[in-house]
Amino acid sequence: MNRIVILGAGYAGLITAVSLAGRTRRREDVQITIVNAEERFTERLRLHQTASGQRLADLRIPELLAGTRVEFVRGWVTGIDTAAHRVRVDDGREIEYDRLVYALGATADTDTVPGVGEHAYTLDSAHDAELLARKLASLGNGTVVVCGGGLTGVEAAAEVAEQHPGLDVVLLGRQEPGSTMAPKAKAHLHAGLARLGVRVVSGVEIVKVRPGSVDLADGTSVQADAVLWTSGVRVPVLAAAAGLRVDGSGRIVTDPALRSVSHPQVYAVGDAAAIQQGYGVLHGTCGSGLANGVHAATSIVRELDGRQPRTFRFGYLHAAVSLGRHDAVIQFTHPDDSPKRFFLTGRPAVWYKETVSSIAWPSFGQLKTFPAMGAFVWRRGGRFTR
């Protein structure tokens, strides 16, 4: 029996599981187990909607896995014994594996800046987003400070401003929102934030979060009745503690096939993997996570058949950012994530963003029966990744 254990059921982990289930459904020598802390699937692409008070679909992982031979284990992973090939779960169970897929993702970095862990909300889970939604509903009026000028911060600030027009929303960050976009796309993004009443303060460094304010490096403070932290991420320390080779950010360093360079029976996918491409190390997106998972599943099946896994290649396609429910910007990119001149705004961009955000869950179900579909879910990148 080939025991395959997948840690984490986010986008990358879950697509690995259903792809493996589809590709091995006629084999009797494969046992697949997926471990996740919650039964509910977290649509990370939509957590800014949950935080603003909108209700989303309640998607359940065991329901998706029904009809497969994948065993779902609910629990927190507390340790990995790479010598004994065992995973420990918080209820005391130990799960043995022959191949491990590490897909535990990343969470908001609440340790680097003092006060963030105690006084700021995050978008790490549906529960965290719901806590912020309840806080915003109780304010009536006041100031909400969103820390982080990346796409997550922009989407959250826009969503909160649209759903709670009585609140003053401030977006703080080192970088200017839309800094990676072409000039006209960035201009539309700034115009959309201004239309919603979001006050943008860029080029600042946050040094502390207090119960009622955010302190900046220049000595000034921004009053805040609620703080949302979207600046920076961290990965679990489990990989480093298990002796797997990690980079300076704690991500597992992989070979071209997505296997750990120190422990080749361990695959790493998603935000917790340091995957080298021709243009640099891959940064985490939903699209890259889905591609990682499909490739890892395909590679494992190739190994089971006595063949060598192929090299993983991935090219970016777009940067998609919503500006509330009625506007968005889609910046199309070269495979190395640099912006092209072409972009979408307005209703076409809203449709595009909604399509992208909604496609993962039905695709999971289809891959159980038609796993070959996974070969078409990502761009290989041509000369940028060759």
Image (tube, rainbow, N blue to C red):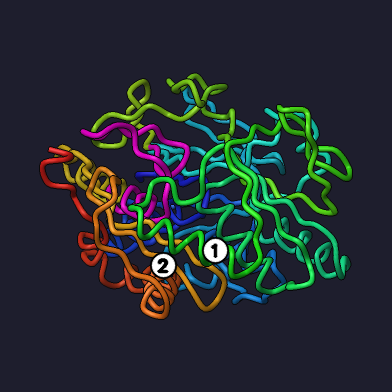
Residue placed most toward the observer, 152 or 61: 152
> What's the residue at 78%, 66% (across, down)?
167
Per the rendering, the mark at residue 360 is: 2
On screen, residue 212 above or below 199: above
Residue 218 appears left or right of 1: right
Mark 1: few/some/many CA within 10 Å (<14, 14-19, 20+): many
- In percent of width and height, residue 142 lies at 85, 61
Going from N to C along the chain, the mark reached first, 1 or 2, is: 1
Instruction: State the image quarter where residue 54 is shown.
Output: bottom right
> What's the residue at 38%, 38% (across, down)?
99
Per the rendering, the mark at residue 164 is: none
> Where, quadrant-wise, is the N terminus in this rendering?
top left
Residue at the spot of label 1: 43
Q: Are marks 1 and 2 in contact (CB under 8 Å)?
A: yes
In the rendered structure, which amino acid carries the disc numbered 2?
Answer: Ala
The residues bearing labels 1 and 2 have C-alpha atoms spaced at a distance of 9 Å
Label 2 residue SS? helix
Label 1 residue SS? loop
Residue 94 appears left or right of 216: left
- In percent of width and height, residue 381 lies at 18, 47
Residue placed most toward the observer, 338 or 253: 338
- In percent of width and height, residue 300 lies at 28, 44
Residue 29 appears left or right of 190: left
In the rendered structure, which amino acid carries the disc numbered 1?
Answer: Glu
Query: Is residue 159 in the magenta section?
Result: no
Mark 2: few/some/many CA within 10 Å (<14, 14-19, 20+): some
Instruction: State the image quarter where residue 3 is shown.
Output: top left
Point out the stretch of residues depicted in magenta: 268-295
On screen, residue 256 above or below 146: above
Answer whether residue 365 is visible to the viewer in this image. Answer: no
Query: Is residue 269 in the magenta section?
Result: yes
> What's the residue at 62%, 67% (across, down)?
159
